[in-house]
Amino acid sequence: MWHAGTPSWRIQQGTSYLVDVALYVRDALALSVTTEPDIPLLTPPVPVSVPAGVDRAAVAEQWPDWWADVLTAAEVGHYAGPLRPAVDAAVSAFEGEFARYQSTLHDEHVDVGDIVGATEVELGRPARPFRLTITELAVQGSLCHRITPEHVLMSTEFIRDAPSRDAVLRRIVAGLA
């Protein structure tokens, strides 16, 4: 996770352990769950398996509420969700496989300071205090979705598309600054 900013604004960007593990569990168990927004499969794809002791149906039932808590945790910086026994068992069962998968991921760094600086010039004043969290997702395709005014999900592919990424960030920062 990268952090940038001044005393008046803070931008946190990068991958989130909890978001990554939630998507890993979803894909590894081939869960048919709805995400808001619609989140494509991980890339690289993960093998599908149901480890002994994991109740796939119970995980599927608990996963949507867990996903909502995970997104909140990515924005606020800590997890305060309830215990979910089926999800917890799945996370434990995939611990080794997920650690190997996660070691292949690398955050894409974005110099948001330049975007904030340009926005301040356009506004003719310093930015008002704000916080922004950019959570990078290692998923297939180009995805950018603002889930709250201060939290945006971006796929690695979208982050690498500098013109599209910077246009979106300029609009977001202008609205927050």
Image (cartoon, helix red, strand yellow):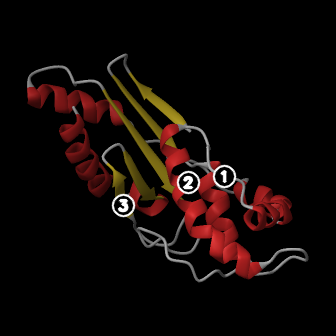
Of the numbered discs 2 and 3, the one sitting upstream in the chain is 2
Of the numbered discs 1 and 2, the one sitting upstream in the chain is 2
Numbered mark located on residue 110 in the image: none
Picture coordinates of residue 19, whole percent (x, y): 59, 56
Picture coordinates of residue 68, whole percent (x, y): 52, 59
User: Which residue is found at the position 65% from the left and 76% from the top?
Assistant: 60
User: Which residue is found at the position 48% from the left and 50% from the top?
Assistant: 135
Numbered mark located on residue 144 in the image: 3
Picture coordinates of residue 115, whole percent (x, y): 27, 36
Residues at marks 1 and 2 touching, judged by CB atoms closer than 8 Å:
yes
Left or right position of 129 against 152 = left
Of the numbered discs 1 and 3, the one sitting upstream in the chain is 1
Residue 45 visible somewhere in the drawing: no
Residues at marks 2 and 3 touching, judged by CB atoms closer than 8 Å:
no
Find disc 2 in the rendering and name its residue. 69
Numbered mark located on residue 82 in the image: 1
Left or right position of 125 against 49 = left
Label 1 sits on a secondary structure element that is: loop
Residue 84 visible somewhere in the drawing: yes
At label 2, the amino acid type is Asp
At label 3, the amino acid type is Cys
Picture coordinates of residue 130, whole percent (x, y): 31, 30
Report, in whole angstroms, how far the alpha carbon at label 2 lies from the one at label 3: 20 Å
| 75 lies above or below 33 | above
